[in-house]
Image (cartoon, rainbow, N blue to C red):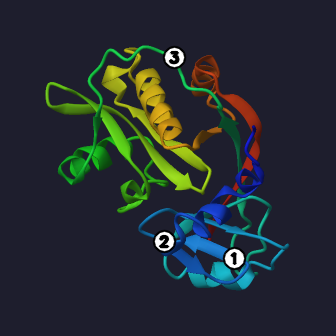
Amino acid sequence: MKINEDALDNPVWFSLTDIHSDQCIDYGNVKFYQTDYAPFGAFINNQDTAFAIEKYAQLIKAFFIVGNKPKVPASFKPPIKHVGLQMIIYDKIKHPITETIIELNEANYQDLTTLVKLVYPEFFKEKTNALGRYYGIYKNQKLVAVTGERMQTNNFIEISAVVTHPNFLGNGYARQLITHTANRIFDDGKIPFLHVDENNLGPIALYKKLGFTIRREMQYWKVSS
């Protein structure tokens, strides 16, 4: 039986009212992640977001509202729209895993942040890794590829931070890490999903090969004062 996917239409909101409620800054119908966890917010009921955005902007220089276009204070720059694709998979991935994949912990923290910030400096914050599990592949004591978990609800876990060091591309590490991460999520009785920029054609093709399908477009509105 297919699980109700309504929470995925507003994944930041449902993560912050569910598994990640302890990481939430709450302005009623507008909610944000605490700034050291993730730079994301969301709203419901066509809420006028200007007040909450003005308050949150005192805590972080730039951030994203995920979902419908927000209303910003008159003194702010117009929000900039980025479009992502939300993709989902309902069956375990059968791709073979030949590399040694480890679950990262605090001892790997510096290696993780150094690698991820090569690619995702805006999205990865001081405590982002605490939102879920992270997995990695080391070569010659160097962390060369990672994949992690970010947004979470009762039924769904987002695969995030799919990163391979530029010097180690083409070895199939991302494919194996996504397989490992997705299958661990299935083992927990949940469904994996992910978000990818609509222009990242290479990753989109990879996710499709592994069995992910496009569920919908997601709008990310970058807000800065």
Circle on res. 123: none
Q: Horizontal placement of 143 versus 71: left or right?
A: left
Q: Are marks 2 and 3 in contact (CB under 8 Å)?
A: no
Q: Amino acid at mark 3?
A: Lys
Q: How many marks?
A: 3
Q: Amino acid at mark 1?
A: Val
Please report whichever mark, 3 or 1, sits nearer to the chain's N-terminal start. 1
Vertical placement of residue 137 versus 147, above or below: above
Residue where numbered disc 1 is placed: 30
Percent across and percent down for residue 182 are: 50, 34
For the residues labelled 3 and 1, the Cα–Cα distance comes to 40 Å
Front in this rendered view, residue 44 or 198: 44
Residue where numbered disc 2 is placed: 23
Q: Residue at x 38, y 22 (%)?
A: 173
Vertical placement of residue 176 versus 219, above or below: above
Q: Secondary structure at mark 3?
A: loop
Q: Secondary structure at mark 2?
A: helix
Front in this rendered view, residue 46 or 94: 94
Q: Amino acid at mark 2?
A: Gln
Residue where numbered disc 3 is placed: 94
